[in-house]
Amino acid sequence: GESVGLHLPTLSVQEGDNSIINCAYSNSASDYFIWYKQESGKGPQFIIDIRSNMDKRQGQRVTVLLNKTVKHLSLQIAATQPGDSAVYFCAENPNTGFQKLVFGTGTRLLVSP
Amino acid sequence: GAGVSQSPRYKVTKRGQDVALRCDPISGHVSLYWYRQALGQGPEFLTYFNYEAQQDKSGLPNDRFSAERPEGSISTLTIQRTEQRDSAMYRCASSPRVSLTDTQYFGPGTRLTVL
């Protein structure tokens, strides 16, 4: 399969640790943000989203934090598991009236057993 | 139900040939998107449809690229007179409603290689 993210920033953690993946976005008008997980050879898989009128949203083992003041988004993964190893992308809707997403660079998460 | 499907999964063509990439969205999804993803990067928007109407084609690189969705379901992305720089993973996504904040669900992609 394809190799995603050959030269991406990498976060290495031990199984059971909490992981924090960060993303800076550039458009202050963006009103919708999504985190995607991409495993090698697969398409991006939705993890969690958040709208600009919120600053925190929780899912199962994942939390997204949005700081609009500094245009920063983070994904927290609790009790990281080897199956969480993948490349993680943040994406934003720039609020131009169209439904397109603009993706960030991506971060590779490596989880060691 | 089934997710987004794309065909072919791999396409190798010679420079100058035309190619057609197919996307079958999740059943019932009214919005369909095309993205292109280079190795090591996130997907880059190309174009999208609500039902059969193309809403935004600002991401198409040039006029060799076109897309259609004539019946509001299956979509085809066509690249004419392919060039080596067109080599990439082409991804399709769909979402259930016409909404700026709907989740987009991605397919497995078509890996295009232009020799």
Image: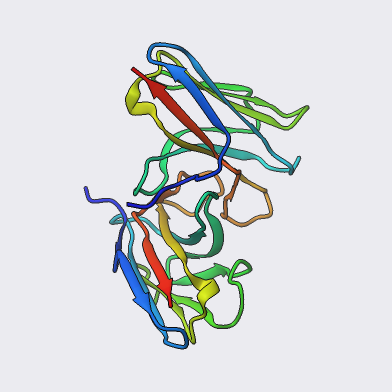
- Total labels drawn: 0
Residue B22 sits above or below residue B5 on the image: below
Residue A13 sits above or below residue B82 on the image: above
Q: Position of residue B36 (x, y in %)?
A: 50, 61
In the rendered view, does A12 fall on the left or right side of A39? right
Kindly identify the residue that appears in the image at 48 percent across and 85 percent down.
Answer: B80
Q: How is the image coloured?
A: rainbow
Kindly identify the residue that appears in the image at 32 percent across and 27 percent down.
Answer: A83
Q: Position of residue A54 (x, y in %)?
A: 62, 25
Q: Quadrant of the C terminus of chain A?
A: top left
Asked if one can make out residue B31 in the rendered structure from this viewpoint, the answer is: no
Asked if one can make out residue A105 in the rendered structure from this viewpoint, the answer is: yes
In the rendered view, does B43 fall on the left or right side of B107? right
Location of residue A92 (image quadrant): top right
Q: Position of residue A1 (x, y in %)?
A: 32, 52
Q: Position of residue A16 (x, y in %)?
A: 39, 11
**Of residues A28 and B90, the one drawn nearer to the viewer in this rendering:** B90
Location of residue B17 (image quadrant): bottom left
Kindly identify the residue that appears in the image at 51 percent across and 72 percent down.
Answer: B86
Residue A106 sits above or below residue A57 on the image: below
In the rendered view, does A66 fall on the left or right side of B48? right
